[in-house]
Image (spheres, rainbow, N blue to C red):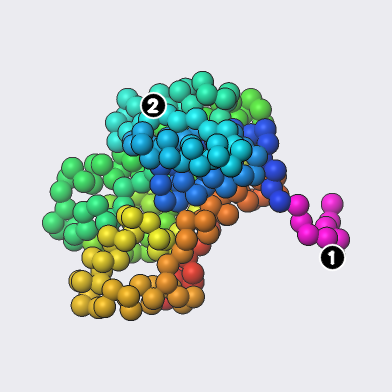
Amino acid sequence: METPANQTPAAPNLAPHIALVTGAGRGIGRAIAQQLSAAGARVVLSARSERELNETAAAIRDAGGDAACVVCDLSDRSQSSTLVSAANDQFGPIDILVNNAGVGSASDPRPLADYRDEFWDLSLEVNLTAPYVLSKGVLPAMRHARWGRIITIASINGKQANLHAGAYAATKHGVIGLMRTLALEHAAEGITVNCICPGPVKTAMNDIRIRYDAERLGRDLAEHEAGLTPIGGRLDPDDIAAMAVYLASDSARMITGQSYNIDGGRCMF
């Protein structure tokens, strides 16, 4: 049904859906969890830090939402393989999965020729294997309900090269391909699968990366940050969260297999 020209479209209503958000202790993950809750979803929060999870949960509950916490280290396959089951025990079957947790290039920026194999393996496990394991875990309930949303936070580095970020770029390219395949395989079952590709976002992880790049290029930090995007500066985590809420809503029911750049126009550089 069309919305009349003089009527504001209704805000997304995600009740009674249940979301699992990884990397929900801070940054983009925290913002997504809070906005999903504000839209009516009950949210299961997962991250390595119990303290950060409790802070996110407290913020959600203080705003009138429902949140539960499951501590999980996605670099450990034995933990990632049981996360969905633990999350289902909180409010019921997960029908919105947000694969947000990641290992960024800021963790160990260096040319590929100087890479440590341990960092390569860690990046693959968290950025690519964990989304595969978790997506596979939530699919049975979604297929039974004939409704589901899988939203993965990729990166603009999943579409282009980036110096001294080989593992990050490789895993983000890979996860976009993985999610497109899932989208195609389950499109007729009411399950949509999409990626969000952020540009530089104001997070602790990205703070480290922009300082590294500014020093490497011999630039003033403030000037470097201001020139990161055509719009100017970096994005806020809420800019990413707003797209996640939209993709989780019924308004996006005909959108699947897509990877949206939310990057302040950086992809035009």
Q: Label 1 is placed on what type of residue? A: Ala
Q: Is residue 171 above or below residue 61?
A: below
Q: Label 2 is placed on what type of residue? A: Ser
Q: Is residue 145 above or below residue 265?
A: above
**Residue drawn 23% across the image and 46% down it:** 120
Q: Position of residue 213 (x, y in %)?
A: 25, 69
Q: Quadrant of residue 211?
A: bottom left
Does the magenta-highlighted stretch encompass residue 9? Answer: yes
Q: Which residue is mark 2?
A: 81
Q: Position of residue 263 (x, y in %)?
A: 47, 65
**Is the magenta region chiefly helix, strand or loop?**
loop
**Residue drawn 59% across the image and 37% down it:** 65
Q: Which residue is mark 1?
A: 5
Residues at circles 1 and 2 in contact by the CB criterion of under 8 Å? no
Q: Viewed as shown, does residue 77 lie left or right of 159? A: left
Q: Quadrant of residue 118?
A: top left
**Residue drawn 76% across the image and 52% down it:** 10
Could one spot residue 81 in this view of the protein? yes
Q: Position of residue 175 (x, y in %)?
A: 42, 47
Q: Secondary structure at mark 2?
A: helix
Residue at the far left in the pictured view: 114
Instruction: Identify the mark nearer the N-term, 1 or 2.
Output: 1
Disc 2 crowd rating (10 Å Cα; few below 14, some 14-19, many 20+) is some
Q: Position of residue 178 (x, y in %)?
A: 45, 44
- Quadrant holding the C terminus: bottom left
- What range of the chain is rendered magenta? 1-10
Disc 1 crowd rating (10 Å Cα; few below 14, some 14-19, many 20+) is few
**Residue drawn 42% across the image and 29% down it:** 70
